[in-house]
Image (spheres, grey):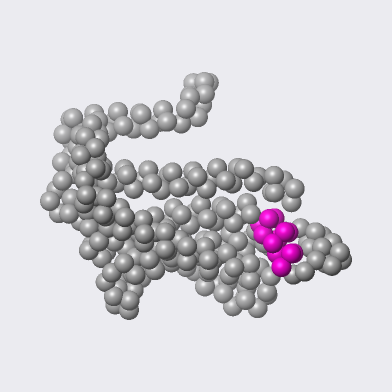
């Protein structure tokens, strides 16, 4: 970030927002915005508790299962849509619809079909993440250099070698971009799913803190969830930067 002609760390912008937050809280302009220092103190109090550990374990398990399904289904399906014209025509419209659709509106339907429990949250995470992964994988494979594919065929490469050594490597930047977006959407899915169910995980804690007007604990939990999503996104982005040469070679 450049400020007044000088480069300053991006964290500096967060410091500014935290100072503004602290001032607003101290001025008591709103009962739902406590001082940031009180939020930090509340966070230090709730993080070591057994209740938070249990809720975090449930949420992380649901998130991991949902993302594993999204990756295991989304990437192969995106490849199939890019390489098989019939599959692309059959599913392309639905993928684009669900990428832009409000998936949270489907959670009550999932609750009626699957039931109230962790399975509904896993499916919610899956639905939030899978479609953007499919779309980006499809775009990446379609943009792969066709001359490399033809050359591999001329040298007698097997189909699995073409996919593993050319198409997937060429599409890797777009696939990772889809994974990064899918991770962010997956975090939204686990929180929204548990909020609507309000029986398990961090959703139960959000419901507990909001109903009892424990705003310091509520905002502390919000910050923890935001930090989790940010760290996961940055981890995938780091891998993206490490394989940028594939995009350049393509």
Query: Residue 103's image quarter?
Result: bottom left
- What stretch of residues is rendered in magenta? 160-171
Where residue 147 appears, x then y in whole percent?
82, 60
Q: Is residue 89 left or right of residue 159?
A: left
Res 41 → quadrant? top left
> Is residue 49 inside the magenta stretch?
no
| Front-lying residue, 65 or 91 | 65
The residue that appears at 36% across and 61% down in the rendered structure is 62
* Residue 162 visible somewhere in the drawing: yes
- Do we see residue 104 in this rendering? no
Q: Identify the residue at image location x=42%, y=31%.
A: 11
- Magenta stretch prevailing secondary structure: helix
Front-lying residue, 86 or 153: 153
Give the side of residue 171 with respect to residue 231, left or right.
Answer: right
- Residue 162 as seen in the image, left or right of residue 139: right
Residue at 84% x, 67% y is 156
What residue do we see at 86% from left, 64% from top? Answer: 155
Q: Position of residue 130 (x, y in %)?
A: 49, 64
Circle count: 0
Instruction: Farthest residue to the left: give it.
Output: 212
Give the quadrant of residue 152. Answer: bottom right
Q: Is residue 203 above or below residue 233?
A: below
Residue 204 rendering spot, x and y as whole percentages = 22, 58
Q: Does the magenta run of residues contain 164?
A: yes
Q: Residue 247 location, x and y as percent?
A: 69, 48
The residue most toward the front is: 50
Relative side of 241 to 157, left or right: left
């Amino acid at each position: 970030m450049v400020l007044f002609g000088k480069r300053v760390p991006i964290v500096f912008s967060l410091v500014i927002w935290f100072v503004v937050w602290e001032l607003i809280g101290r001025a008591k302009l709103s009962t739902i915005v406590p001082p940031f220092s009180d939020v930090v103190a509340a966070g230090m109090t709730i993080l070591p508790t057994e209740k938070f550990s249990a809720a975090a374990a449930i949420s992380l398990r649901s998130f991991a299962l949902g993302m594993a399904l999204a990756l295991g289904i989304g990437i192969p399906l995106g490849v199939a849509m890019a390489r098989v014209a019939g599959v692309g025509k059959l599913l392309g419209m639905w993928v684009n619809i669900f990428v832009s659709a409000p998936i949270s509106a489907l959670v009550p339907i999932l609750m009626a079909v699957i039931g109230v429990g962790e399975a509904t949250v896993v499916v919610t995470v899956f639905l939030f993440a899978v479609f953007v992964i499919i779309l980006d994988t499809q775009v990446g494979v379609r943009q792969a250099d066709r001359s490399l594919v033809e050359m591999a065929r001329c040298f007698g490469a097997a189909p699995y070698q073409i996919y593993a050594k050319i198409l997937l490597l060429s599409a890797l930047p777009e696939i990772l971009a889809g994974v990064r977006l899918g991770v962010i959407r997956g975090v939204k899915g686990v929180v929204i799913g548990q909020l609507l169910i309000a029986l398990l995980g961090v959703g139960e804690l959000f419901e507990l803190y909001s109903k009892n007007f424990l705003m310091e604990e509520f905002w502390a939990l919000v910050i923890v969830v935001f930090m989790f999503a940010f760290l996961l996104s940055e981890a995938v982005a780091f891998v993206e930067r490490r394989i940028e040469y594939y995009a350049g070679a393509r």
